[in-house]
Amino acid sequence: MKTSKIMAPAVLSMLAAASAHAEGYEPVQPLKAVTSRSEVASEAAAAAHGGNVYGDVVAAPLTSRPSLRDRASIRAEAVATAHAPNQNLDRRAFANSEVPPQFRTARP
């Protein structure tokens, strides 16, 4: 009785292993190119010069609006912000996600 209980799983596992080896294996097939490299290159160049055919906006040139502020005032504000002692503070680094008052400074 004990021998039959031991032999049954062994025989089943051997059958399973034999059936696994019976499967056929198809290796990766080599690429069979229909078009030549020059044809592919010319199609790629035509597609690149054709624009974005999937774009959902009308192809319009980018325009910029003139600024109401002068360049010197913008640069001065950028320099002041870069030198501010609290520019890199993350409120998540503090308790209750609140920046303590001693770290808060009025920005220009």
Image (cartoon, rainbow, N blue to C red):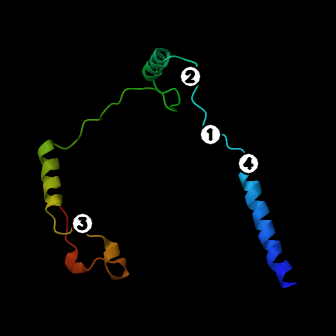
Near-viewer residue (75 or 83): 83
Q: CA distance from mark 4 to mark 3?
A: 62 Å
Q: CA distance from mark 3 to mark 2?
A: 55 Å
Q: Position of residue 33 (x, y in %)?
A: 56, 22
Find numbered disc 3 in the image and state the secondary structure of the residue it sits on. Answer: loop
Please name the amino acid that badge 1 sits on: Pro
Determine which quarter of the picture holds residue 93: bottom left
Badge number at residue 23 = 4
Badge number at residue 71 = none
Residue pointed to by mark 1: 27
Q: Is residue 39 above or below residue 97?
A: above
Whether residue 37 sits left or right of residue 73 in the image: it is: right
Find numbered disc 4 in the image and state the secondary structure of the residue it sits on. Answer: loop
Badge number at residue 88 = 3
Find numbered disc 2 in the image and state the secondary structure of the residue it sits on. Answer: loop
Q: Quadrant of the N terminus?
A: bottom right
Please name the amino acid that badge 3 sits on: Asn
Q: CA distance from mark 1 to mark 2?
A: 18 Å
Q: Earlier in the sequence, mark 4 or mark 3?
A: 4
Q: CA distance from mark 2 to mark 4?
A: 29 Å
> Cβ–Cβ below 8 Å for labels 4 and 1?
no
Q: Earlier in the sequence, mark 3 or mark 1?
A: 1
- For the image, the number of numbered tags is 4
> Cβ–Cβ below 8 Å for labels 3 and 1?
no
Q: Earlier in the sequence, mark 3 or mark 2?
A: 2
Residue at 81% in and 74% down: 7
